[in-house]
Image (cartoon, rainbow, N blue to C red):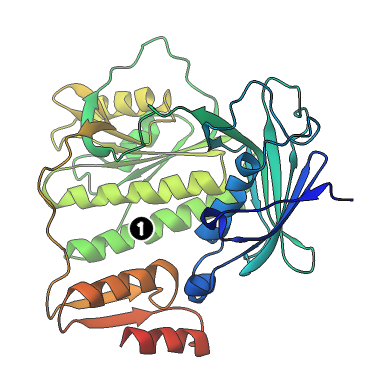
Amino acid sequence: VWGMGADYSSGHQANEQVHIGQGLVLAKLSLPSGIRNTEGLFVLHPFIINAALQMPPAYLFSNDENIMRPSGIDPLQKIRPTAIERLEIFRECPCEMWALIRYSRGSGAGHNTQKYDIDLCDEGGQVCVRIKGCSYKVGGACEKTPGVMLLQPFWKEQAVAEDTMVPTYERHVVMLCETDTIAAGDIEFSLAGMECITLQSGMEEVDRRFEKYAVQVFEKIKSILNDKPKGKVLVQIVTMPQHEKLLFAGLCGILKTAQKENPKIHGQLIEVEDTEKMEGLIEILKTSSRHPADSRIRFAEGKRWIPVWSKAEMPSETPDIPWKDRGVYLITGGAKGLGLIFAKEIARQAKEVTLILTGRSLLDQDKQTSLEELK
């Protein structure tokens, strides 16, 4: 069935076997013995995924014109993966896998562009990961190596067009978070069909107040989702960014998560000045509803601002290590994945530290071994 075998260099040490057929490549991939202990740390192990993505460029070229050879490409040039159309994950990847590479539908030898589908299967033939529409770019010798970009947040002034159409919302909910000068009843009276709620805490400490507000926002959104709305729902949280109240901007995270759960939910966290009057707030709510994609908006000094990212200069000096000697660190999920990586890094770079590792899964033998190594 397979046209030929293939040799591979030390740079492709994950490849144990490679078979090339007409428009197909089948390769057995495995983790080298030196990193087999990292098998359980990833759903998609970077070593296996990298080896699979390197398979098409590694075996694109053959003396047989019918075997995966795109026209017009010099085989001496470097070829890099640039994009994939779809990634499906069905189960975790074991340390030994089979990769099946083939042309994507509508692609193939003789086409202007080539895209490839890659199936990663376990020893039993079950598909664990499916990569569809993987495309590649030819890079010359003078092409710059990708570097690091440092970004910093800042507030950008952004006015809104007055003639912007207001989307139709099946439900419009406004939550007031410590806006003492504004009453919920007055807003409901001014905006027909809108539900306004004042978040309640009864606590003095700001962290306890935040916790209470977060639970109320969560419960309200949960009840909205349980009602299974058919149309768009707009949820606006109004707060003030002065002093410790700036902490309440973190409620924006709940709104963003809700929209990921159900695209019909549109959430906005709106920050206003403590001198804002009722009439001004009503106009702010109306204006903001025209742009549901803006998840966080600040109104100050008569202007409208949204948070954006800008490029920042890279620091010239090496940053200080954040871990302190004799420090105490609590790491959630500390016995697996990123948690264990951070724990090892702290233990390596700091002296006499106390590490508290927590997790939801049982402390099995593999985790216990990792903890003993950490000690």
The spot of residue 117 in percent (x, y) is 71, 42
- Left or right relative to 344: residue 244: left
Dot 1 alpha-carbon crowd within 10 angstroms: few under 14, some 14 to 19, many 20 or more: some
Q: Quadrant of residue 129?
A: bottom right
Which residue is denoted by mark 1 in the rendering? 214
- Which residue sits furthest top? 163
- Left or right relative to 20: residue 209: left
- Left or right relative to 82: residue 235: left
Decide: is 107 above or below 183: above
- Left or right relative to 46: residue 93: right
The spot of residue 355 in percent (x, y) is 26, 81
Decide: is 121 above or below 312: below
Identify residue type, mark 1: Ala
Residue at the location (27% across, 59% down)?
Answer: 210
Q: Quadrant of residue 102?
A: top right
Secondary structure under the numbered disc 1 in the rendered image:
helix
The spot of residue 374 in percent (x, y) is 33, 83
Residue 198 in sight? no
Q: Quadrant of the C terminus?
A: bottom left
Viewer-side residue, 120 vs 217: 120
